[in-house]
Amino acid sequence: PSFDISHLAYSPSQLLYAQVKRGLDIIAVIATLPLTVLITALVGLYLFVLDGYPVIFVQIRRGFGGRRFRMYKFRTMYKGTAGGATSVSDKRVMPGCLLIRKLRLDELPQLYNILRGDMSLIGPRPEAIDLSRKYEKAIPEYTYRSLVLPGITGWAQVNSGYTSNPDEALIKLSHDLYYIKHLSFDL
């Protein structure tokens, strides 16, 4: 992607959005708590019945400014299975958890990451440290994703979904950089 950080200049409305975005994230999380707590409890109980504790998966991810943080997700794979990309017929995924993943209910624990200030509702999706290193070596502009807080969802997720190789990461990166450049209420 063609992105020169020296050309990044926000308009007054973009600066206003950047200033109030954190407050909007907190308000949104608190306003949705009655629903999200109920859904979180149901998903957690379902996962516990399937495969016991822990129901939460914790992974170190790279966030704002390249800082590392602990990102929380519901564990949708059986205990003791190795990580990596999943496929539709992946035997590591517990019954019913493909639907949980498809509906992104496994991301609900990240609302805690938002309250902690590690993440935002909207922003570039944080990658695992090893994957970030791999993409940064292949695509030098990849580090620019850390100019804003990572998000539970973002422009790249809406437009390109998951990635599994550097070519797909480049497409996703172009969407992330578009978001960073055009950061605004309407986007």
Image (spheres, rainbow, N blue to C red):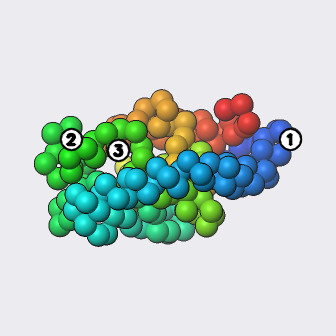
Badge 3: how crowded within 10 Å, few (<14), some, or many (20+)? some
Asked whether residue 102 is in view, the answer is: yes
Of tags 3 and 1, which is closer to the observer? 3
Q: Are marks 2 and 1 in contact (CB under 8 Å)?
A: no
Pick the front one: 106 or 7: 106
Name the amino acid type tagged 1: Pro
Q: Amino acid at mark 2?
A: Ser
Give the class, few, some or many, for how many residues have Cα within 10 Å of label 1's Cα (few <14, many ≥20).
few
Q: Residue at x 60, y 53 (%)?
A: 33
Q: Are marks 3 and 1 in contact (CB under 8 Å)?
A: no
Q: Nearer the viewer, residue 185 or 73?
A: 73
Residue 119, quarter of picture = bottom right
Q: Earlier in the sequence, mark 3 or mark 2?
A: 2
Up/down of 65 relative to 11, above or below: below
Q: Residue at x 71, y 31 (%)?
A: 186
- Mark 1 — residue? 12
Residue assigned mark 2: 87
Q: Which comes sooner in the sequence, label 3 or label 1? A: 1
CA–CA distance in space, label 2 to label 1 = 44 Å
Whole-percent x, y for residue 175 in the image: 52, 35
Q: Position of residue 78 (x, y in %)?
A: 20, 59
Which residue is the site of mark 3? 100
Q: Nearer the viewer, residue 9 or 159?
A: 159
